[in-house]
Structure formats: C-alpha cells, structure tokens
Amino acid sequence: MSRMTAMFAGLIALPTSVFADAVPSKEAAEGTFAEAPFSPYANRTFPERPLWGDTHLHTSLSLDAGAFGNTLGPDAAWRFAKGEQVISSTGQPVRLARPLDWMVLTDHTDLMGFAPDLQAGKPGVLADPKGLQWY
C-alpha cells in the first residue's frame, strides 16, 4: 500500500472510530425527552376533502380576455363554475365534470367592457377614430 493510500485510510478511520461511541443505545435515549415535544401539526392527517376552484378568471369584460376571443360574460362564467352547460367562445356546448367549489372572478377595471362593445360595433366606440380603426 502506498504511503498516500495509508494516510488517506487513516484519516477516514480516525473520525469513524471516535464517533462510533457517540451514538446512544435505544435504552439510553428513551429517557431523554420526558414530555412530548410541542408540534401543532403532529398526528394530524391530510385534508379529507380538498376543494377545487379557479383563483384568477377573466371574462369577456376584461380587455385582455375579450381581445383574445373570450365571449363569455360573468353570468356564463358563474353558471359554468356551478356545473351548468354553457356555450363556449368557440360555439361548442361545454360543462365541467363536477362543479367548482369556489371561483374568483378577476376582471380588470381598466377599459372594462370595451372588448364586447368593440366586437358588437357599438356607436359610442365607433364614434372615436381609434375605436373605428380597431373595429
């Protein structure tokens, strides 16, 4: 065995032998904690009834969703979340397999309702040159 290998083996064996006696036996460790440690989540189980929902839903009233073709308004969104059948933006009847437990409707306030008004060609929108250009 080379001198370097012997030195390396000694460096590994020395700490191992020193700490071998540092691990207490099971009997010696049993009396270490007389009381149960506090943990509010100890012995608790996972939720038995997870709730399913949507945290961020935009309808056609939001400019970003409406500009990308969403034609469903808040009423249709709520009906869809409750498990009712609605007609999607592509014209297909759709329905969830099970209703959502909760939903957050997060339409933007800036330019709210502009997209459906633009798509409908409402006179108030078309009276503005930019509205007419976008139409």
Image (cartoon, rainbow, N blue to C red):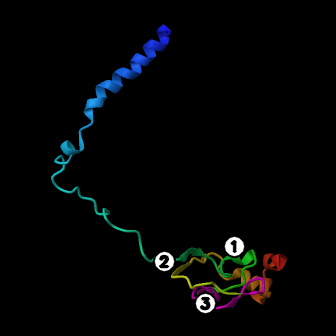
Q: Secondary structure at mark 2?
A: loop
- Image spot of residue 16 (x, y percent): 35, 26
Q: Which residue is mark 3?
A: 79
Quarter of the view holding residue 123: bottom right
Q: Which residues are magenta?
A: 76-93
> Tag 2: residue type?
Leu
Q: Residue at x 58, y 84 (%)?
A: 98
Q: Residue under circle 1?
A: 64
The answer to whether any part of residue 127 appears in the image is no
Q: Amino acid at mark 3?
A: Arg
Mark 1 is surrounded, within 10 Å at the Cα level, by few (under 14), some (14 to 19) or many (20 or more) other residues, namely some
SS class, disc 3: helix
Q: Which quarter of the picture shows residue 44?
A: bottom left
Pointer 2 local density, CA inside 10 Å: few below 14, some 14–19, many at least 20: few
For label 1, the SS is helix
CA–CA distance in space, label 2 to label 1: 28 Å
Residue named by callout 2: 51
Q: Residue at x 24, y 38 (%)?
A: 24
Q: Quadrant of residue 128?
A: bottom right
